Amino acid sequence: MKYITTIDEREFTIEILEEGRLLLDGEEYAVDFESVDGQPVFSLLLNGRSYEAYVYQGDEGLQVLLHGALYLATVEDEREKRLRAAAGGGVVEKGEFHLKAPMPGLVVAVPVSEGSQVAKGDVLVVLESMKMQNELKAPREGTVARLRVRPGDSVEQKQTLLSVV
């Protein structure tokens, strides 16, 4: 089965060959991917290199926190992609977007305020978790409508931090 994965508007084709092997854009990799104790933490071994990521199902796809950077990812099989393309579907760039905490942590900084204009990729919140500071960035341009946290606040996973319209 082939899957199309989109990360920050860049598409990757992934084909599962068999247990522990896959093709990523035509290049073969040895992989081992496991959930850590039922948490939203995943361990990935890719050609012998180890990675750890937090993966959370958000409103607009998967939120993947890797090495302190937050990525928005969507995964669909070839059939789903063809059906969406035929129906004229695409990324929704309008409406309200709710930035949610991908993990529990402490809000270190909020460099925006209500009414601030933000561009795609602007830092909205800096969240500290497990002694790492993670920059949570805007997935699209808009205006900060509602700010629900301040520096020093403790937040839970999936808690809404702010909204962008």
Image: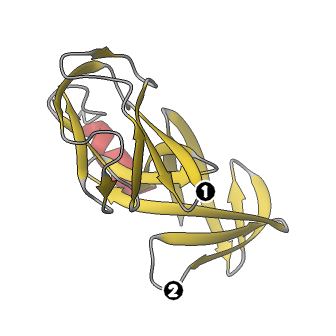
Q: Secondary structure at mark 2?
A: loop
Inspect the image, locate mark 1, and give the three-letter code of the amino acid beneath it: Ile
Residue at x 29% of width, y 43% of height: 84
- Furthest toward the right, the residue is 48
User: What's the mark number on residue 14?
Assistant: 1
Residue 117 spot, x, y in % from top left: 28, 13
Residue 162 spot, x, y in % from top left: 23, 38
Residue 45 spot, x, y in % from top left: 74, 70
Q: 27 or 106, which lies in front?
A: 106
Image quarter of residue 53: bottom right
Work out how far the residue at label 1 is from the one at label 2, CA to CA, in angstroms.
26 Å
Q: Residues within 10 Å of mark 1 (few under 14, many from 20)?
A: many
Q: Is residue 86 above or below residue 47?
A: above
- Furthest toward the top, the residue is 117
Image quarter of residue 34: bottom right
- Name the image colouring: secondary structure
User: What's the mark number on residue 37?
Assistant: 2
Residue 46 spot, x, y in % from top left: 76, 64
Q: Nearer the viewer, mark 1 or mark 2?
A: 2
- Looking at the image, residue 65 sits to the left or right of residue 20; the answer is left
For the C terminus, the quadrant is top left
Q: 18 or 123, which lies in front?
A: 123
Residue at x 34% of width, y 25% of height: 140
Inspect the image, locate mark 2, and give the three-letter code of the amino acid beneath it: Asp
Q: 103 or 1, which lies in front?
A: 103
